Amino acid sequence: MSGVGLGVWGRSLVVDDVSAPSIVPWLMALALVVAWVLALAAHGAYALRFAGSGTEEYRAVTRAAATLVAVIACASFLLHAPFSRTVVLVAAPTMLALSGTSRWLLRRHIARRRLEGYYLQPTLLVGDVSSVRDMADHILREPAASGMRIVGACVSDVSDPAVADLRAAGVRVLGSQHDTLGVVERHEVEAVAVASNPELSGVALRRLGWSLEQQDVDLLISPGIVEVAGPRLTMRPAAGVPMLHVERPISSGLRYGIKLMADRLGALLLIVLAAPVLLGIAYLVKRDTPGPVFFTQARVGEGGRMFRMIKFRTMVVDAEQRLADLETVGHDANQTLFKMRTDPRVTRVGAFLRRFSVDELPQLFNVLKGEMSLVGPRPPLTSEVDRYESDAVRRLRVRPGMTGLWQVSGRSDLSWGDSVRLDLWYVDNWSLALDAQILVRTAEAVIRGRGAY
């Protein structure tokens, strides 16, 4: 309603049709509100399965806005309707912005409540023990994203020794796969999640779906692949058999070119806007302790190419020489990256710069030179790359970023395995929308300073 009200108010300033009665804009505004709600519903923006996680909800809102504008434009042209262009041009973007913001705030509320145990769908896991265990690990690791509460599991072989591991993880084994329908009735299950299992497929899986439909229970099927974002998955029928098509990760083409262009233009704009801040920080660093203003370090970039990453100096000049002594004491980060919460090598000004990550602002020049991206995997040291396992090498397929999923998910508090997992997920699933979302979340992470030391 707010967006439509602004549109009508804007029309009062710029009138398109002076002959139209004053009540006409408000009638059109009411019609616009109804059309907006219908467009959202038509595109699935109110579907509960999208609430709280994923990007499909935002994509549905965007498609609804585009559809609404297109329908109004066509109707106005074909019917010669006196619909105010001002109302459309002001109301549609405003409704899109307000709807996106309100849904973002609602998601934050849902995520907090889910972490407290609310708004979770009682779910029964079905499949072989190993597949169920993997699925349970993902659900238990991120309850806010999954929106599920595991009621228990029905496994293919209850005598499998691995059942003990499943129970140790806190998942009750309530029976075999053949007991699924009975367990659903006894435990008030709202969803059944079937892990990849050759014994439960084809006709058997279809019959299970029919039975669950009669009990008003959702059926979820895991395709057996992990760390793949929804937009890369589409159903592709082949001779009546539904096939899951997995799109290749984007590493070239128009969208990748837009990302590279946006990186350089964004870096140039930020350098110009932040010039006074950069000069002020440079003055403080120089005045605090003897030594250069900037610290440069060899890092491994896209395709294994080396480059010199630039940062404001936050440590004493002989920090590298004193590292060996500190490593014998121990550190607070993961087993691969050396980090100490109270590193004695960090200067007074350096501690403040690290707290709010402003020591990384000079990396904008690396982005401007095309060595880094605004968003991407963390730029690794050569010593880290030398210890990479085969999967981790995939992080080098794209340019490293000033920020990324690691930045908004805990930074130095992350384990090495979690850091690699997040970077690999980004390499495989990045998109322009995801980059924008990470940049917004980075501002919040920097303000809070969580995991920065």
Image (cartoon, rainbow, N blue to C red):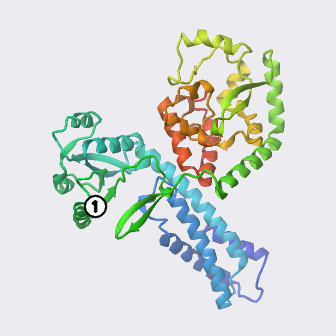
Q: Residue at left 66%, top 85%?
A: 76
Q: Which residue is mark 1?
A: 217
Nearest the viewer among 361 and 1 is 361
Is there any visible trace of residue 249 in the rendered image? yes
How many other residues sit within 10 Å of disc 1, few (<14), some (14-19) or many (≥20)? some
Nearest the viewer among 260 and 21 is 260
Q: Is residue 169 left or right of residue 376?
A: left
Circle 1: element type: loop
Q: Is residue 225 left or right of residue 380?
A: left
Residue 30 pos. (x, y %) = 59, 78
Residue type at mark 1: give it.
Val
Instruction: For the N terminus, give its image quadrant.
Output: bottom right
* 80 w.r.t. 359: above or below: below
Residue 427 pos. (x, y %) = 56, 45
Residue 211 pos. (x, y %) = 21, 64
Instruction: For the C terminus, give its image quadrant.
Output: top right
Residue 139 pos. (x, y %) = 37, 44
Q: Residue at left 52%, top 41%?
A: 424
Q: Is residue 398 left or right of residue 124?
A: right
* 323 w.r.t. 196: above or below: above
Q: Residue at left 22%, top 61%?
A: 204
Residue 18 falls in which quadrant of the image?
Answer: bottom right
Is there any visible trace of residue 356 in the rendered image? no
